Image (spheres, rainbow, N blue to C red):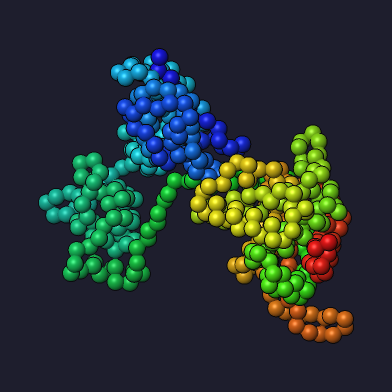
């Protein structure tokens, strides 16, 4: 009998996925273990195996968005009737790209509540246009007699005015002379699976966890000098962010209550230190995790973060790469941002926002001199971390970067 292939849950936060590519077409034979498709989840594009064998009888359209556990394919015997299998599904199997576009387009208003159509006198003829189209034409200085209508019975509607382009040499009406030059335009694209998840998770975090913020400025003179020395012997180039990750990891071992999670009815104090490193990618943000960061040296952290960055851009990160974080670092210093606040990345109790290292003037041992400084802001979940706890963590973090030799012992 025909067997329905349902979209599996390929990450802990996945609710739907996009069928990026089918590796087989209808009529092909598949067996258990074959990679049937590439699926875009909220985190990455991943291979989907098939655990049935037989002939591919049905596939949803490539590019479709499908809910987890919905039917995306059917495998069975050649010529087998599978219509009952599809009709028995409780929910729609998938939404094709064309259907998504159609859903985003305003539908026609029922006749009983249809907007009135304005009739414009054009000599012996009467030109029909919706009130909105007429107003837009007036605002833009467009002569409606030159616009072709695409609505019912040739009625001119909003899109006709938006898409109108006057013929070469056409003379604009006199009242248009004073109108600003230019035309409003925009693009609309479907929300990616990654962006949907970012929106849901961070909205939940921001409006559920009571955030408070602690900021501190750090003298980075010794950290900058130490980094330059390290890079003369390190097998990989150590970045300032690598120093931040290492210093945060070491500080967390001294302040374990910051290395924690709110679980509703209990608080989890983690004995291991897994630091999430926020990375910007084309569709949004990913947070791969440097596991046991406190036990790794700077070269190991640097190599791992660089590998994560490469995999993130290629959408090759796997679930084990982005799960298990106990603390997160978000660094915008490379973009010249002095300071900012970040939204806590669940299930962490804290996230640290890191600004750029910049040249400024400070007082060192009573002497005014040029110094390099960096500002960081710790966002804390007040259900778990109190102000004194967060402040103590930042004090240790600053001491480690101001005396970076402590990171090496």
Count of picture labels: 0
Spot occupied by residue 11 in the image (x, y as percentages of width and height)? 58, 37
Identified at 53% across, 45% down, the residue is 44
Spot occupied by residue 90 in the image (x, y as percentages of width and height)? 47, 21
Q: Nearer the viewer, residue 370 or 407?
A: 407
Q: In the visual, does 190 lie left or right of 335? A: left
Identified at 37% across, 30% down, the residue is 59
Q: In the visual, does 340 lie left or right of 166? A: right
Q: Residue farthest to the left?
A: 124
Spot occupied by residue 58 in the image (x, y as percentages of width and height)? 36, 26
Identified at 25% across, 70% down, the residue is 174
Residue 342 vertical position relative to residue 346 in the rendered view, above or below: below
Q: Residue 95's image quarter?
A: top left
Spot occupied by residue 91 in the image (x, y as percentages of width and height)? 46, 25
Q: Nearer the viewer, residue 37 or 379?
A: 37
Q: In the visual, does 230 lie left or right of 149? A: right
Residue 284 vertical position relative to residue 23 in the rendered view, above or below: below
Residue 247 vertical position relative to residue 54 in the rendered view, above or below: below
Q: Quadrant of the N terminus?
A: top left
Identified at 60% across, 67% down, the residue is 335
Q: Nearer the viewer, residue 281 or 390?
A: 281
Q: Is residue 91 visible?
A: no
Q: Is residue 130 visible?
A: yes
Q: Quadrant of the C terminus?
A: bottom right
């Amino acid at each position: 009998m025909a067997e329905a292939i349902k979209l599996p849950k390929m990450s802990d936060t996945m609710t739907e996925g996009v069928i990026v590519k089918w590796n087989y077409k209808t009529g092909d034979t598949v067996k258990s273990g074959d990679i049937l498709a590439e699926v875009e989840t909220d985190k990455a594009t991943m291979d989907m195996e098939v655990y049935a064998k037989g002939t591919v009888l049905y596939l949803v359209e490539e590019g479709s968005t499908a809910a987890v556990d919905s039917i995306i394919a059917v495998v069975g015997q050649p010529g087998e009737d599978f219509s009952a299998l599809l009709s028995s599904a409780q929910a729609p199997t998938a939404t094709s790209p064309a259907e998504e576009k159609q859903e985003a387009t305003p539908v026609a208003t029922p006749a009983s509540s249809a907007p009135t159509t304005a009739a414009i006198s054009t000599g012996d003829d009467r030109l029909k246009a919706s009130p909105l189209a007429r107003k837009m034409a007036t605002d833009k200085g467009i002569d409606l007699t030159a616009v072709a209508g695409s609505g019912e019975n040739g009625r001119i509607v909003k899109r006709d005015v938006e898409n109108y382009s006057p013929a070469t040499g056409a003379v604009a009406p006199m009242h248009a002379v004073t109108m600003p030059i230019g035309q409003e335009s925009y693009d609309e694209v479907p929300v990616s699976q990654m962006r949907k998840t970012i929106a849901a998770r961070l909205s939940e975090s921001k409006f559920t966890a009571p955030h408070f913020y602690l900021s501190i400025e750090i003298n980075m003179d010794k950290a900058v000098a130490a980094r330059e020395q390290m890079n003369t012997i390190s097998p990989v180039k150590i970045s300032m962010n690598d120093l931040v990750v290492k210093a945060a990891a070491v500080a967390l071992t001294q302040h374990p209550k910051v290395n924690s999670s709110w679980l509703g009815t209990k608080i989890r104090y983690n004995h291991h230190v897994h630091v999430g490193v926020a990375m910007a990618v084309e569709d949004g943000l990913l947070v791969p995790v440097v596991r046991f960061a406190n036990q790794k040296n700077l070269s190991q952290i640097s190599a791992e973060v660089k590998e994560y960055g490469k995999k993130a851009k290629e959408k090759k990160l796997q679930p084990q790469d982005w799960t298990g974080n106990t603390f997160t670092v978000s660094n915008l210093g490379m973009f010249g941002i002095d300071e900012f606040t970040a939204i806590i990345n669940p299930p962490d109790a804290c996230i640290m926002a890191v600004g750029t290292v910049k040249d400024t003037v400070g007082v060192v041992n009573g002497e005014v001199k040029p110094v390099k400084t960096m500002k960081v802001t710790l966002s804390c979940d007040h259900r778990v971390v109190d102000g004194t706890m967060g402040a103590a963590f930042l004090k240790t973090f600053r001491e480690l970067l101001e005396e970076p030799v402590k990171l090496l012992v």
